[in-house]
Image: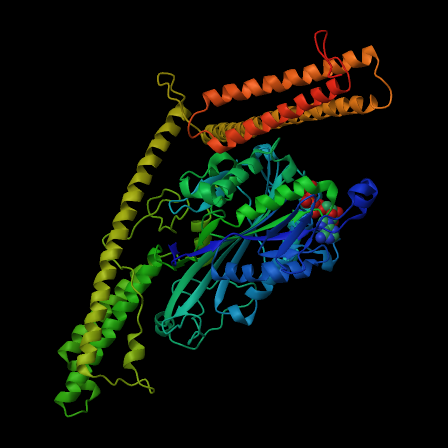
Amino acid sequence: MSSNGGTSTSVQVALRIKPLTQDDLTNLPARFQRQIISVSPYNQNQVVVEQEKRQIFQFDHVFSPETTQQEVYERAIENMITKFLEGYNVTILAYGQTSSGKTHTMGTADDRSIPPESKGIIPRTMAALFSLVTSGQYKSHKFSIKVSFIEIHNEDLIDLLGEGNEEERPPVMIREDSRGNIYWTGLQELKVTNVDEVMEWVGVTDMNSKSSRSHAIFSVTMVQQKFIPHNYIPGGQPVTSPPSSRPGTPASSRFGSQPSSRTNSSLDKFDDGEWVTISSKFHFVDLAGSERGISINSGLLALGNVISALGDPNKARHTTHVPYRDSKLTRLLQDSLGGNAQTLMIACVSPIEYNVNETISTLKYANRARNIKNLASVNQEEAGWNDVSHLQNLVMKLRSEISSLKAAAAQNALRSQNGGTISPEKVSQSPIINGNKHSLNGYSEKNNRISGMNTPNTPNNDIIGKNIPITSGIPGRMTPTTTSGIPGRNTPVGGRDTPTRIRPTSPLNTFTNGNGNMNIHQPKEKESYEALEEQLLQLQRSYSELSQKHAKTSAELALHQDNYDEMGEIIKNNDPGIKLKVVTEQEIEQFEKTISSLESKLAITSAALTHSESMLKEQENRLEGANSTNEQNKDLVASLQKYIKELEGKLQQREIDLRIASTRDTPPSEKFISETIQLLETRLKEKEEAYSELEEKLNNFQLGESSESSSSDKITRLEAKLEFLSNEVNKLRSLGIKLGPDDRPEN
Ligand SMILES: Nc1ncnc2c1ncn2[C@@H]1O[C@H](COP(=O)(O)OP(=O)(O)OP(=O)(O)O)[C@@H](O)[C@H]1O
């Protein structure tokens, strides 16, 4: 599978705000029904959350509560179908709290009872896909479309389309190929040819009863064969039509309609261009309710960690490890997040205040996902390069072309010898032509021999087998020529010449005029002849390599088969002298199940550990915050204490003033006087204490701690206060008030 370059694309994120439903209106107290989220009136891709503080979030699309299913499809999904047909992997994920509209949006639970306008993304996409692949636009393509549907519940993979008893089915296993593509085995994949069939399968799974704690993944795998003419201009119109089928392979049906065919000779058909195989997969993921993520669902937890590792710009810069293996969900979505896929996340939210915390958390989560970068590329390979029969045919065609060219060259040589004309007899007598004839005969014998040996493949079946290994069959096994007697064993065509990977050219087009007569210029002809011979040599080399590989594989297979047979014999004879432990397929399956369950447990533990770590970090941050608040509070208490002291001072002063004022009209009593004196003494004492404190500070004053002028200012202020107090005392004395037993009033 070649990657055609690869385009870096960000994960697209759409936000969908659900309308207030009858359920919300009846079940929630009216005071919580206030709508707190809306589309910004200034930017259609922004939402505004109105709470104590206003928050604005930006997305690639924002769908208001009024947006219809059709509008969501047209604005966000339609272009992804085009990408899927171009050969890109596509993933759409619906994220959000329970009842936020994920299933409604995806159409995961759609069946016949759903009115057309309410149908979700899956039925709309499938309808569009089938309509496109059967349209004239893709008439030169052959398609094979398969669907699968799985549920992930507590790290268990459940095949929703699986037949029979769940316990008896092979375990669903997640695998990664050498190119990093994720695929799964043991899963039922159903070939579908129209949207009704698809929705029937979806309908029988009863997704309406899907737990909000489980994830549902509906997947479409598409394999298409496309004919690319040699004079193909990328992005432009193909210049020629493709042949009806690849040579040596019967044409497979394209949902009833055959690709258009020309009335070309088989050589023309073959040489016009090449068949390429494009395979792509489309995942529709309806995630579990996000509010349960933290407490229950390790998949969502791991998804959060993956998004965080890929989407948080600070982390993404330093993180080399992305914890895909922490859960089955993230493992399945590995190539959709940061890998080879075009990905859209639809974040679903409720509009009302009651759900505000979950809404904000969804908005933040989705916003982070926008930073994830994928590297999407078309999954394409030329058809037949792993296919022996295809390569054999290629060798035959090239040999035939060389023979024709040799014949033409001889004819030309004779024509120039005879002044431009040539009789048929002369042609047949020509030694060159005889040589040709001989070689043509030789070729034709070989041709017969090869055709007899080959089992033509049906391209679609062959390709699907290679790309999506489903059950225990060996992926990518070629259709063998069975001579060894061992079922399924591949046998190479030993000792034959070898083709190599080249683009077939069209020499006949180059050398044939409109009437089909030869019109050959010798130098040109020689060049082409040499080029063809070179191509043939290359093909022979490559073919020989392929044969050797086949021989090796066959030998290995034979060895295994022998061991297997030997063991079978031992078991059959039940020889008590030999105690051999025979590992049966059932045991392997059992091991795989145990490994799978251990992996699940490990994933849950690892996800919980990651979660605990993040909780710990959060607690540490909170503690740090609390400490700093504490410090601030201490400062506040100190300044408040100071303020209270000041107020107390003022109050005392005010009391003194009042007492003095009251003595003006009536002579003060003994008690009054002694209380006033006590007050004044306290005040004086306080001032003295403050004064001595200041004096001490002044003594300890270090240069640089405070300016000299500010210290002297304080002293001046204190001196003024002292003066004020002694004035007050004098005033009291002048009123004849005795301020102590030894005091002498002024009169
Ligand atoms: N955009 C919408 N328009 C009309 N009704 C909607 C919309 N979105 C959701 N609903 C309705 O709200 C209810 C809850 O939606 P839905 O079942 O899709 O939520 P969910 O997020 O899939 O929940 P869960 O996590 O439990 O699977 C359903 O009755 C659905 O029809």
Residue under the point 41% across and 21% down: 574
Seen from the viewer's position, the closer of residues 656 and 273 is 656
Seen from the viewer's position, the closer of residues 333 and 646 is 646
Q: Is residue 291 left or right of residue 711?
A: right
**Total number of numbered discs in the rendering:** 0
Q: Is residue 303 left or right of residue 389?
A: right
Which color mode does the image show? rainbow
Residue under the point 56% across and 35% down: 301
Which residue is at the far front? 747
In which quadrant of the rendered view does residue 293 lie? top right
In which quadrant of the rendered view does residue 432 lie? bottom left
Location of residue 416 in the rendering, given as x and y in whole percent from the top left corner: 15, 88
In the rendered image, which quarter contains the N terminus? bottom left
Q: Is residue 52 above or below residue 9?
A: above
Which residue is at the far right? 666
Q: Is residue 203 visible?
A: no
Q: Is residue 607 left or right of residue 363?
A: left
Seen from the viewer's position, the closer of residues 732 and 27 is 732
Location of residue 136 in the rendering, given as x and y in whole percent from the top left corner: 54, 72
Seen from the viewer's position, the closer of residues 633 and 152 is 633
Q: Is residue 271 above or below residue 122?
A: below
In the rendered image, which quarter contains the C terminus? top right
Location of residue 427 in the rendering, given as x and y in whole percent from the top left corner: 19, 83
Q: Is residue 88 visible?
A: yes
In which quadrant of the rendered view does residue 96 lie? top right
Location of residue 594 in the rendering, given as x and y in whole percent from the top left corner: 49, 27
Which residue is at the far top? 741
